[in-house]
């Protein structure tokens, strides 16, 4: 199939995308984490399309993207600590869940009826230009079919949706390649709901306050279903040997005796591994591999998020 709804992101395609968004259409755009499937957060019609094309359960709420903290504060309620958190890490790969304002105008479908809302100011220039130009808060889940691997290129988005998305703005590969960290700002302080590039250690160091730790086995946020990021292949994690009929995904130096052509980062660089992770998970399905062994990934920094995604992919 022709992928003629992929267009390079530039000033004129951003205008076209904005017009589609204003008419309650859906588009895909790059962020520094993964590609998003964007629609006006003010329009229930537009949001209904997102749930439909993603085949996403309606109880799993969406993240709303805005161009600034000022705009975020028109939608959600930020206490002093939360405002500080946003000032330090926005724009960037961090989503903050706060109580929603009663007069926010955000469609109830976005929050799946919760009294809180997930907000994020992305740092990717294309995403920011789009948000500034269309001047609408954009609900944008990752642009993949529900339960599958998030997209880090425009082609990944096309592979899942073909032309059921009006246009896909192509901004090349995503810088981080793993979804944003999600922090819940609650009465009892900050809770990590999803691990990402910004770890709880980094937040604790910057703000001098404790972040309640994330347990990858607990379903804390609605929609944080355990099975996720699921390639068709069966994954075996923390592998140092290769069983019969397995392909190996390495990280750094591959154990003696294993010949591996797939490597998350030959130099053992966790940031590079995160960037490559979803492309590699998608490619093992393209290669029709059935059994895959994945090397041990150090559980530090962004390695925590990589291991979280791998564990969900391996279920
Ligand atoms: O990096 C990202 O965050 C990407 C890019 C496109 O910005 N977006 C993304 O969206 O990963 P999505 O829909 O794939 O993941 C959103 C997560 C879900 O696990 C959802 O349950 C959670 O955010 N979420 C949304 N609203 C929430 C809320 N009010 N309370 C708790 N969790 C919430
Ligand atoms: Mg997602």
Image (cartoon, rainbow, N blue to C red):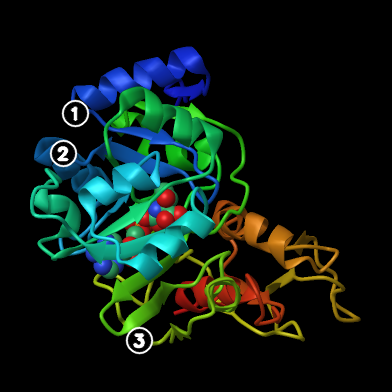
Which residue: 39% across, 49% down? 144
Judge left or right: residue 47 versus residue 145.
Answer: left
Label 3 C-beta lies within 8 Å of the nearest ligand 1 atom: no
For the residue carrying disc 3, how many other residues have a C-alpha within 10 Å: few (<14), some (14-19), or many (20+)?
few
Which residue: 38% across, 79% down? 191
Instruction: Judge depth for marks 2 and 1 and give the one in front.
Output: 2
Which residue: 14% across, 60% down? 112
Dot 3 lies on which element?
loop
Question: Does 229 appear above or below 40?
Answer: below
Circle nearer the N terminus (1, 3): 1
For the residue carrying disc 2, how many other residues have a C-alpha within 10 Å: few (<14), some (14-19), or many (20+)?
many
- As measured in the structure, the alpha-carbon distance from the residue carrying label 2 to the one carrying label 3 is 31 Å
> Residue extending furthest front?
80
Judge left or right: residue 22 versus residue 130.
Answer: left
Q: Position of residue 46 (x, y in %)?
A: 17, 36
Question: Does 47 appear above or below 268?
Answer: above
Q: Position of residue 139 (x, y in %)?
A: 28, 45
**Residue designated by label 1:** 24
Dot 2 lies on which element?
loop
Foreground: 160 or 25?
Answer: 25
For the residue carrying disc 1, how many other residues have a C-alpha within 10 Å: few (<14), some (14-19), or many (20+)?
many
Label 1 C-beta lies within 8 Å of the nearest ligand 1 atom: no
Question: Does 50 appear above or below 148?
Answer: above
- As measured in the structure, the alpha-carbon distance from the residue carrying label 1 to the one carrying label 3 is 35 Å
Which residue: 26% across, 27% down? 21
**Residue designated by label 3:** 218
Tell me whether circle 1 and circle 3 mark residues in contact (CB < 8 Å).
no
Quadrant hosting residue 85: bottom left
**Residue designated by label 2:** 42
Foreground: 72 or 122?
Answer: 72
């Amino acid at each position: 199939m022709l992928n003629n709804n992929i267009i390079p992101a530039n000033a004129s395609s951003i205008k076209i995308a904005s017009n589609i968004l204003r008419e309650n259409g859906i588009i895909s755009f790059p962020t520094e984490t993964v590609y998003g499937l964007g629609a006006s957060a003010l329009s229930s019609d537009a949001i209904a399309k997102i749930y439909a094309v993603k085949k996403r359960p309606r109880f799993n709420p969406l993240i709303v993207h805005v161009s600034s903290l000022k705009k975020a504060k028109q939608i959600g309620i930020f206490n002093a600590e939360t405002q500080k958190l946003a000032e330090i890490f926005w724009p960037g790969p961090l989503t903050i869940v706060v109580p929603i304002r009663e007069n926010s105008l955000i469609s109830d479908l976005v929050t799946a009826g919760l009294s809180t809302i997930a907000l994020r100011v992305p740092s990717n220039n294309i995403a920011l230009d789009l948000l500034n130009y269309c001047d609408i808060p954009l609900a944008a889940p990752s642009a993949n079919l529900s339960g599958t691997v998030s997209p880090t290129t425009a082609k990944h988005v096309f592979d899942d949706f073909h032309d059921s998305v009006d246009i896909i703005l192509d901004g090349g590969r995503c810088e981080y390649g793993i979804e944003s960290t999600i922090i819940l700002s609650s009465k009892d302080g900050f809770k990590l709901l999803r691990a990402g590039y910004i770890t709880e250690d980094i937040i604790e160091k910057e703000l001098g306050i404790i972040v309640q730790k994330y347990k990858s086995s607990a379903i804390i946020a609605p929609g944080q279903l355990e099975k996720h990021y699921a390639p068709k292949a069966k994954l075996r994690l923390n592998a140092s040997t290769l069983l019969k009929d397995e392909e190996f995904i390495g990280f750094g130096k591959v154990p003696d005796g294993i010949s591996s052509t797939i490597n998350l980062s030959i130099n053992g660089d966790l940031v590079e591994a995160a960037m490559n992770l979803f492309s590699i998970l998608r490619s093992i399905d393209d290669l029709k591999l059935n059994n895959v062994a994945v090397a041990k990934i150090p559980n530090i920094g962004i390695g925590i998020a990589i291991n979280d995604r791998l564990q969900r992919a391996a279920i």
